[in-house]
Image (cartoon, grey):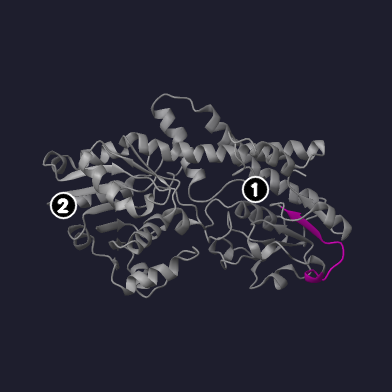
Amino acid sequence: MKLCMIGTGYVGLVSGVCFSDVGNIVYCVDKDKNKINSLNKGIVPIYEPGLEEILKKNHKQKRLIFTTDLKKAVINSDIIFICVGTPTKKNSNSANLKYVFNVAHELKKIISKYKIIITKSTVPVTTGDQIEKILYNLKNKKLVDVVSNPEFLREGEAIRDFIYPDRVIVGTNSKKANRILRSLYLPIIKKNSRFYSTSRRGAELIKYASNAFLATKISFINEIANLCEKTDVDVKDISMGMGSDQRIGDRFLRAGPAYGGSCFPKDTRALIDTGKKFKTDLSIVKSVVNSNDKRRSLLTKKVEKILNGNLKNKIVTFLGVTFKPNTDDMREASSIPMIKYLNKKKCKIKYYDPSGEKNEFKKLKNVEYCKNISSACLKADLVVLHTEWNDFKLLNFKNLIKKNNFKIYDMRNLYSPLKMKKLKINYFSIGR
């Protein structure tokens, strides 16, 4: 099939590359000329394991086309995916849908024969209805079917999630569109995964409900971790004991920093906003958002406590600053408010992350990016294990840190408190 992905951000690029890899011709469209030029050279703007290799292979075989020419891409495609950003509006919880609607208005000028238009972006309930209103004349002429097909790609695991999905959700009442999309996904739904057909509004809400529930699990176990610290209980035991119940499951029951990234923060907020519009009080989701916001402050204060309130001129090293491993995504990462707070308190901050230097810290004085773990840890007063990259799981801190009385704050519980005690290392962790 011939597909058009509008937007080459995380969702559009990963989906486009993977669709081309199963034999489709895919046009990836973006207004950013520099990004398109880079992609045509095989330079990938995001850190995602395996993506660059698959991109280069399919681009070379001419199944993957990067262009700024929206009209040409739409005319030559059967299925149009809207993959633009839906960030949170400033001073609001609601999703900013202007980019989605801008695309719909552009499509209205171009389409002259039947196309399936799919919202792949995460959008609130009724967004498809609003797109359909923009395309009213095309809909009346039966030239378009507007479908919701949310993505469920985890950053760092996106290629695997695309090829072996837990589920493919298609929201449409059109039998024709449903049949075509089932055929499109046939190469991957054969692999023991599931193809679910539902209403368009149903598909839109499934995405938000899923992310809100996963965010709830993270916030729940983080609150239990707070209780564990005060009752001398190991939160890992609680997670294992709970997670072995099949009704609960152990995924997303690992205590640590506040959840971050491109999805959970904005999607929980947008779901609350949708509830408000439909006069429904989503009190549980509100509590999750509130708990997560408090989490950032609580862990920052814990750093201050570990250093006995004496922060001035202390060298604090962050190992990992992204919100999770195997991605370069810094959106809503807990490291940002933590580092900014410590910087204001006159700490000297050093950090290392396998995905490279971060723009978020470039303008901060006394915040230094280090090119390796050794230089980052040298002479540190405190090492904060913020992100659980594999690079950080087997470190010999005594060899790395050329200073006595250093401290470790393990925010991911990567190390054993007992082993650290035997090594006579001042070690602090989460919920233990």
Of 183 and 255, nearer the camera is: 183
Question: Can residue 430 be found in the magenta stretch?
Answer: no
Question: Can residue 402 be found in the magenta stretch?
Answer: yes
Q: Measured along the vertical axis of the image, is residue 290 above or below residue 115?
A: above
What residue span does the magenta drawing correspond to? Answer: 399-410
Where does residue 322 sit, x and y in percent of width and height? 58, 58
Residue 155 image label = none
Where does residue 408 sit, x and y in percent of width and height? 78, 57
Where does residue 227 sit, x and y in percent of width and height? 74, 36
Mark yes or no: residue 307 visible: no
Amino acid of disc 1:
Pro
Mark yes or no: residue 314 visible: yes
Using a 10 Å C-alpha cutoff, classify the residue at mark 1 as few (fewer than 14 neighbours), some (14 to 19) or many (20 or more): many
Is residue 1 left or right of 187 when viewed as pictured? left
Using a 10 Å C-alpha cutoff, classify the residue at mark 2 as few (fewer than 14 neighbours), some (14 to 19) or many (20 or more): some
Q: Residue at x 48, y 47 (%)?
A: 263
State the CA–CA distance, disc 1 to disc 2.
46 Å
Q: Quadrant of the C terminus?
A: top right
Q: Quadrant of the N terminus?
A: bottom left
Of 388 and 272, nearer the camera is: 388
Where does residue 382 sit, x and y in percent of width and height? 77, 60
Q: Residue at x 46, y 64 (%)?
A: 46
Tell me the residue that label 1 is attached to: 257
Tell me the residue that label 2 is attached to: 111
Is residue 339 left or right of 265 when viewed as pictured? right
Q: Measured along the vertical axis of the image, is residue 202 above or below residue 40?
A: above
Of 94 and 20, nearer the camera is: 20
First reached walking from the N terminus: tag 1 or tag 2: 2
Q: Secondary structure at mark 1?
A: loop
Q: Quadrant of residue 150?
A: top left
Amino acid of disc 2:
Ile
Q: Secondary structure at mark 2?
A: loop
